[in-house]
Amino acid sequence: MINRGILELKTTAKRLLDSRSLGLLGTRGISNSRILFSPRPTEVNTAAVSESRSVNETPRNPRSPLNPQMSFPCLEKLERRSKKLIEEGPEPVYSKISRKNVEMFHSGEPIFLDYGGFLPEFDIAYECWGNLNEARSNVILIHTGLSASSHAHSTSKNRSKGWWEDFIGPGKYLDTEKYFVVCTNVLGGCYGSTGPMSIDPSTGEKYATTFPVVSVNDMVRAQHRLISQYFGVSKLYCSIGASMGGMQSLAYAYEFTDEVEKVISISGCAKSHPYSIAMRFCQRQVLMTDPKWNKGYYYDSVPPHSGMKLAREIATVTYRSGPEWEQRFGVERADPSSQPALCPDFLIETYLDHAGEKWCLEYDANSLLYISKAMDLFDMSKKIRSQAFNSRIQAEKRFKGENLSVNDLVYKPMESCKFNQPMKENRISRRFSPEEAKEDLVEGMSRIAGKDVLVIGVESDILFPAWQQKEIYELLKEAGRRKGLDTSKLQHVELSQEQSYYGHDTFLLALKDIGEPVKNFLLH
């Protein structure tokens, strides 16, 4: 019986080995697919095994795996990039930004920030198209998303196509025959504006993670200096942006209520919500756990390209939509004739891999951390904005060497800012009830109620779901009603999945569906 079992064992093993030699298993077997039955060690007659073995058969190395080792070209690619960066020196795309391809505005005055920090001076990189009219009343300020530069359209300094190339220009949705269009790189960015890779004048070294936490409202207050001090514009014709730009367009109207005529917020929100915060948190975590990040001090060495690649892959999942990917990729593999691999294998995996590869050296890792955090912190609620105002006052007093009062130094929790027992029992850990939070948000948004506002949402957007744009509209309508204001110029447009299945990136890809309501709103 034992000899028979051993012979069956040998026959099955020989078939598998013959299959492997014929290439039927490919070059990447699956190590846990061992299907052979092995008799108990106590039952094996080693002499019988030896006798039953053919004289022409070479005994298999007991340490050799039955299946071949899988290959990992995706990891080898990362190793090659690290080696190249070490040998040739890190020269990311963002480090090449200079006055040669953007305009620069320098403010020699300090800017005090919402979370108590300050910058003694700062630069804002910008580009512009069209002509400023004599009355300086035709300015449209474009606010960018997280990773975009000021290069929304080609210029004489930079002939490459911009990220909104077909949206801006003569006769286009932002008509440069009518409007003077300006786009900036945000404070904290890496495309020319002051950010973590800029030089701290107090040390002569790059800020790295000594750069102060910035908010979306800080970004627009920096932009305002460019608009008011350099261009001499007292009132924007329109503040427009998508994604984080949609946050900024609202923030600009909040900070400078009487200095903007129209507001357009595309795929934005009145405050960040848990899902989008969670996704950006995951991106920051994979980046910060890349050893090359080195707590932000990597500028003279190899940048954390592996962490940046993974962060971008996570982000890309949130930028597009499931229906689009069903159409484009389905569940097809890139090479169905090959064995399944642990590296990018499905078409969707190769797409994400390419997105990460393309971007990992195009953006500064610290800028990603700071700006994504600014998005998480965005909140138009009255209490949050009041706290931010007080923090800026304290920062200015510290800068001027003034003594802070006891009221300045002591944090006073708000009366309702406490956990209550019933909520705890229901496993809800938030400090404010949903009703309290909404009421606070209505009060904060009331500052821009009654203005001409266009809010655009996209049904297929999973990062900023369409209900968040509807929330902006309803908050402004309610705030206007309470103040007895005319809200007839408040508009809300939602693109259905049939109109666009591109998700959050719709504003970059479905230009006609976004552009037509924008164009009509600007004209009336």
Image (spheres, rainbow, N blue to C red):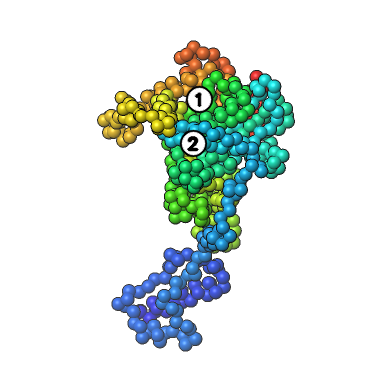
Q: Which residue is mark 2?
A: 120
Q: Position of residue 473 (x, y in %)?
A: 52, 23
Q: Position of residue 163 (x, y in %)?
A: 63, 40
User: In the figure, 60 relative to 508: above or below?
Assistant: below
Q: Nearer the viewer, residue 148 or 64?
A: 148
Residue furthest to the left in view is: 421
Q: Amino acid at mark 1?
A: Glu
The label nearer to you, 2 versus 1, is 2
Q: Position of residue 494 (x, y in %)?
A: 57, 28
| Quarter of the figure with residue 514 | top right
Residue 255 numbered tag: 1
Q: Residue at x 65, y 22 (%)?
A: 137
Q: Residue at x 52, y 65 (%)?
A: 71
User: In the figure, 286 relative to 119: above or below?
Assistant: below
Whole-number angstrom distance, CA of label 2 to CA of label 1: 21 Å
Q: Amino acid at mark 2?
A: Pro
> Dot 1: within a 10 Å radius of its alpha carbon, few (fewer than 14), some, or many (20 or more) residues?
some
User: In the figure, 437 relative to 322: above or below?
Assistant: above
Q: Residue at x 45, y 23 (%)?
A: 444
Question: Label 2's element?
Answer: loop
Q: Position of residue 406 (x, y in %)?
A: 31, 27
Q: Residue at x 69, y 23 (%)?
A: 133
Position of the C terminus, as image quadrant, is: top right
Residue 11 numbered tag: none
User: In the figure, 262 relative to 52: above or below?
Assistant: above
| Quarter of the figure with residue 127 | top right
